[in-house]
């Protein structure tokens, strides 16, 4: 008898739940009107003033003057008035590492091994449990979203499938974060990043982070292995150790599966391999030549600029926590001066070349005193200090970044049909690019993330 009553109660509960779901499905889609004094269109540089954005079911339905848009809106809609703020599309970080938070080791430790600045932190991350890394990534993703980054392309250092798992958790609404394109493990040649590991642990450790390749067939297999974990993009690191044939095989296999290929390439030879192999984007590209820029422009290959270490970044993340020797301080100051001139020339050549470019933070570092989102946003001032105009910077992290991701039909602009990913700042980001370090309003897919602006 008791079992029968329990069964009846359970059946009644599920019937009620089903009715509630059906009722919700039949209810009108939520409609929101966002108003502000100014709306910047990065594509054209035009400003609509005043402006209104009508949002229905998470997407932008109409953009225009408030009187016009409000007249077409249904009665009883939710209105968010941002007053004198400037409205922009949600920001896109086209090159990030959300599951990595490297703490710079002491100077003596860094000097003991190749790539001693980065490798100790990477090794520590690789020996963490996958669950712990994903949970840390969830915090980083939330902090990025809070700073206005509504979309991110995660390019490696996430374990086997940590970024894909984080992406799926965000998409399911389990944790807050930006829309993520996941790349899974980096494709590398043997000997990249980490050398000289103990033979007993080398292969299992490497398998957690990388897919080594040593020929075209294994290159194709590595792409398939990543596809098994449902990645969105393929990341390959080229350091003059990937052959043109291997690079071509990677690109052909990825394109066959409808995936783009992002190639880490910094020196001239690696950049040429990426170009010849047909990469969709070249990440970093520090030593790109004018001839290569022209070829990239003609072929439609994106240059994804990563201004991470510009403007004395290394000193900023080390001095608060590490005692630096006078010699290292002197070297850092001299390096910063040399870098300032070099990146200014690099930036100007990119602007003059006509090549398509985006900008990514390449953020994977612990920045004392800043959230991950605040650390990510330091790239805006770095680009501006190197001579990039504010409007070009904003384009690099909105419309241009959307195109390098292949998501120009979804994000990157405040236009009908796109996701309602919006941010707002108090001032004018064209006059002062650092306004993007102080985002006051964030909306993703029509859902309010934060609003620090006073109601009007």
Image (cartoon, rainbow, N blue to C red):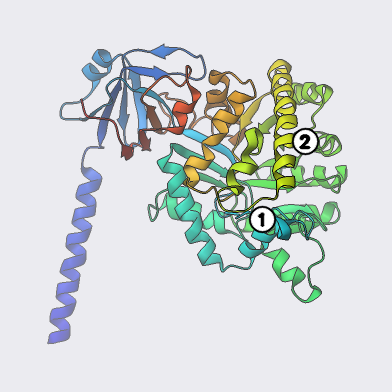
Q: Residue 206, image x and y in percent?
A: 72, 64
For residue 408, side relative to residue 48 (left or right): right
What residue is drawn where x is 16% and y is 26%? 75
Q: Secondary structure at mark 2?
A: loop
Reply above or below: 8 against 356. below
Evaluate whether residue 178 shows in this view. no
Residue at the front extreme, as displayed: 326
* Tag 1 and tag 2, C-beta contact below 8 Å: no
Q: CA distance from mark 1 to mark 2?
A: 20 Å
What residue sits 63% from the left and 20% below the top? 387
Q: Is residue 327 visible?
A: yes
Q: Residue 422 has which mark?
A: none
Classed neighbour count for the residue bearing mark 1: other residues with Cα under 10 Å, few (<14), some (14–19), many (≥20): many
Quarter of the image for residue 330 reads: top right
* Neighbourhood count class around disc 2 (C-alpha, 10 Å): few under 14, some 14–19, many 20 upward: many
In-front residue for pair 351/35: 351
Give the position of the N terminus as an image quadrant: bottom left
Query: Residue 293: horizontal and vertical position, in percent?
Result: 77, 24
Residue 308 or residue 130, whichever sits in front: 308
Q: Position of residue 445 (x, y in %)?
A: 38, 38
Q: Tell me if residue 46 comes above or below residue 12 in the rendering.
A: above
Q: Earlier in the sequence, mark 1 or mark 2?
A: 1
Residue 104's quadrant in the figure? bottom right
Q: Is residue 270 left or right of residue 10?
A: right
Q: Which residue is mark 2?
A: 278
Q: Is residue 133 left or right of residue 63?
A: right
User: Farthest bottom residue?
Assistant: 1
Q: Secondary structure at mark 1?
A: loop
Residue closer to the observer: 409 or 301: 301
Asked if residue 411 is positioned above or below residue 245 in the image, the reply reads above
Where residue 348 sits in the image (x, y, percent)?
A: 70, 19
Q: Which residue is mark 1?
A: 185
């Amino acid at each position: 008898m008791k079992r029968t009553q329990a069964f009846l109660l359970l059946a009644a509960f599920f019937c009620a739940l089903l009715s509630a779901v059906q009722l919700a499905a039949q209810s009108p889609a939520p409609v929101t009107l966002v108003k502000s004094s100014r709306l910047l269109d990065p594509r054209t540089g035009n400003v609509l003033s005043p402006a209104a954005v009508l949002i229905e079911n998470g997407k932008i339905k109409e953009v225009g003057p408030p009187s016009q848009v409000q007249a077409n809106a249904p009665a009883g809609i939710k209105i968010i008035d941002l007053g004198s703020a400037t409205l922009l599309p949600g920001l896109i970080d086209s090159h990030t590492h959300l599951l990595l938070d490297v703490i710079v080791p002491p100077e003596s430790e860094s000097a003991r091994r190749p790539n001693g600045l980065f490798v100790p932190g990477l090794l520590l991350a690789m020996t963490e449990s996958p669950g712990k890394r994903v949970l840390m990534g969830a915090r980083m993703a939330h902090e990025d979203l809070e700073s206005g980054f509504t979309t991110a392309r995660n390019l490696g250092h996430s374990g086997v499938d940590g970024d894909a798992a984080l992406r799926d958790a965000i998409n399911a609404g389990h944790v807050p974060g930006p829309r993520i394109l996941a790349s899974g493990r980096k494709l590398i040649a043997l000997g990249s990043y980490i050398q000289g590991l103990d033979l007993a642990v080398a292969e299992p450790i490497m398998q957690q982070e990388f897919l080594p390749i040593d020929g075209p067939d294994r290159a194709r297999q590595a792409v398939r292995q990543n596809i098994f974990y449902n990645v969105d993009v393929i990341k390959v690191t080229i350091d003059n150790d990937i052959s043109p044939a291997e690079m071509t095989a990677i690109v052909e296999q990825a394109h066959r599966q409808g995936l783009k290929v992002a190639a880490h390439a910094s020196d001239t030879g690696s950049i040429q391999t990426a170009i010849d192999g047909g990469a969709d984007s070249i990440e970093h590209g520090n030593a790109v030549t004018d001839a290569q820029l022209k070829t990239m422009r003609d072929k439609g290959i994106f240059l994804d600029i990563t201004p991470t270490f510009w403007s004395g970044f290394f000193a900023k993340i080390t001095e608060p926590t590490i005692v630096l020797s006078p010699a290292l301080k002197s070297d850092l100051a001299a390096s910063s001066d040399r870098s300032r001139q070099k990146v200014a020339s690099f930036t100007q050549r990119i602007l003059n070349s006509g090549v398509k470019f985006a900008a990514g933070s390449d953020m994977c570092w612990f920045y004392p005193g800043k959230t991950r989102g605040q650390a990510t946003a330091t790239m805006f001032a770095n680009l501006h200090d190197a001579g990039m105009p504010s409007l070009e910077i904003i384009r690099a992290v909105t419309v241009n970044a959307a195109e390098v991701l292949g998501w120009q039909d979804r994000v990157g602009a405040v236009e009908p049909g796109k996701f309602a990913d919006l941010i707002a700042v108090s001032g004018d980001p064209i006059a002062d690019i650092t306004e993007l370090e102080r985002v006051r309003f964030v909306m993703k897919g029509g859902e309010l993330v934060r609003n620090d602006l006073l109601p009007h």
